[in-house]
């Protein structure tokens, strides 16, 4: 009951601004018209390289911090402020204007964040439990999943969006070594997204339509524990495997909605079962098409421009980050420091 009261009190004052999946729109800039915001970087990306957490602002890379498995997993801009969320030394962190705030001394990670009315909402994992932070205060997100006392269970929250005063979060649980269940939380109340085993990695809401993307278990005579890239529209499952291609291991990573059309990035193994390679894709208007990258992690629609972020392979097998704007590539790294993009945001 206490959790419900916290949510209600926070949302009463919220406006009806809509934030949609990876395309979480920027709040009105208080300095709009003064010229201040015009000098801010427009294309923002979060990720990691061999040295730690990295952000890219208009193509220029900046280290956010080195550490054990350090990574920037999410980016959001509000007014003149830029926020990144991630992990350093196995601790959940948020960077505001590159200044680091450690949210907890426990083990964890920030996987996504948004800012509205000056409040910072972040989701991720803390001490193996799905967690929501509001202005640095943590709330554990629980589910009704019943687990055998002889098995271990962990949970995680992977994405957040706020629509008309409601907070939508998606993630899931892992039971033992391989069983997964996809969950969504709406104002703190959990519901299972699908009977399919799997995991939810992003969420977008368009009116009364809720889009969830991730991976879903499918029966297979060829693959053991096959998980395919998946889209759920109000709970209805869509396998994103391209037409006339064999189902293979894959994962949908990001969804945004523009003019009631969902755009989804995903990656999967392509080719013969004994000779395959990783391939990135974009799903749009019911069709999946290849993107010139190995993994597609993020999609963002801004006006008439479509951005896709991911990784591609250079000579010698090195992996570098890349952003495609209307199918034109911008490489953000070199073979010296292989890196990965996890999230993008466009002012």
Image (cartoon, helix red, strand yellow):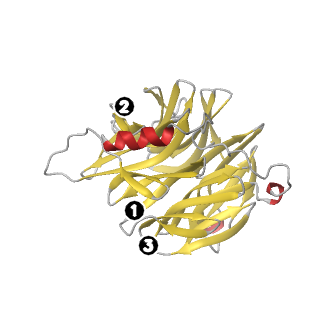
**In terms of sequence position, does the residue under pointer 2 or pointer 3 come before the other?**
3
Residue 36 or residue 174, whichever sits in front: 36
Q: In the displayed structure, would residue 15 be above or below residue 336?
A: above
Label 3: how many residues lie within 10 Å, few (<14), some (14-19) or many (20+)?
some
Q: Which residue corresponds to mark 2?
A: 194
Q: Is label 2 in contact with label 3 (beta carbons under 8 Å)?
A: no
Residue located 18% across and 51% down the image: 151
Disc 3 secondary structure class = loop
Q: Which residue corresponds to mark 3?
A: 89
**In terms of sequence position, does the residue under pointer 3 or pointer 1 come before the other?**
3
Q: Position of residue 231 (x, y in %)?
A: 49, 33
Q: CA distance from mark 2 to mark 1?
A: 26 Å
Q: CA distance from mark 2 to mark 3?
A: 34 Å
Residue located 48% across and 50% down the image: 275
Q: Is label 2 in contact with label 1 (beta carbons under 8 Å)?
A: no
Q: Which residue corresponds to mark 1?
A: 108
Q: Is residue 224 visible?
A: no
Q: In the displayed structure, would residue 144 be above or below residue 343?
A: above
Label 1: how many residues lie within 10 Å, few (<14), some (14-19) or many (20+)?
many
Q: Position of residue 3 (x, y in %)?
A: 35, 44
């Amino acid at each position: 009951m206490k959790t419900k009261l916290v949510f209600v009190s926070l949302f009463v004052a919220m406006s009806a601004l809509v934030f949609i999946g990876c395309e979480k729109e920027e709040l009105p800039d208080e300095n709009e018209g003064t010229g201040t915001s015009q000098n801010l970087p427009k294309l923002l990306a979060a990720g990691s390289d061999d040295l730690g957490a990295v952000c890219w602002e208009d193509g220029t890379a900046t280290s956010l911090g080195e550490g054990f498995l350090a990574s920037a997993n999410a980016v959001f801009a509000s007014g003149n402020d830029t926020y990144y969320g991630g992990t350093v030394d196995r601790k959940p962190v948020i960077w505001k204007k590159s200044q680091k705030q450690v949210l907890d001394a426990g083990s964890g990670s920030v996987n996504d964040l948004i800012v509205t009315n000056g409040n910072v909402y972040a989701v991720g994992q803390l001490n193996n439990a799905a967690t929501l932070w509001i202005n640095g205060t943590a709330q554990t997100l629980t589910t009704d999943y019943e687990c055998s006392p002889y098995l271990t269970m962990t949970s995680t929250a992977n994405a957040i969006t706020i629509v008309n005063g409601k907070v939508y979060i998606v993630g899931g649980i892992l039971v033992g070594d391989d069983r997964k269940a996809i969950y969504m939380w709406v104002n703190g109340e959990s519901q299972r997204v699908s009977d399919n085993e799997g995991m939810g990695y992003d969420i977008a809401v368009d009116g009364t339509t809720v889009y969830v993307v991730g991976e879903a278990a499918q029966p297979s005579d060829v693959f053991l524990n096959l998980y395919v890239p998946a889209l759920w529209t109000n709970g209805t499952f869509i396998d994103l495997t391209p037409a006339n291609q064999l189902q293979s291991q894959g994962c949908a990573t990001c969804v945004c909605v523009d003019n009631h059309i969902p755009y989804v990035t995903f990656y999967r193994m392509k080719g013969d079962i004994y000779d395959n390679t990783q391939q990135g894709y974009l799903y749009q208007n019911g069709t999946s098409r290849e993107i010139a990258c190995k993994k597609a992690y993020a999609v963002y629609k801004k006006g008439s421009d479509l951005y896709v972020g991911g990784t591609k392979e250079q000579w010698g097998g090195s992996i570098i980050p890349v952003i495609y704007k209307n199918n034109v590539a911008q490489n953000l790294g070199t073979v010296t420091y292989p890196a990965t993009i996890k999230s993008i945001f466009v002012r």
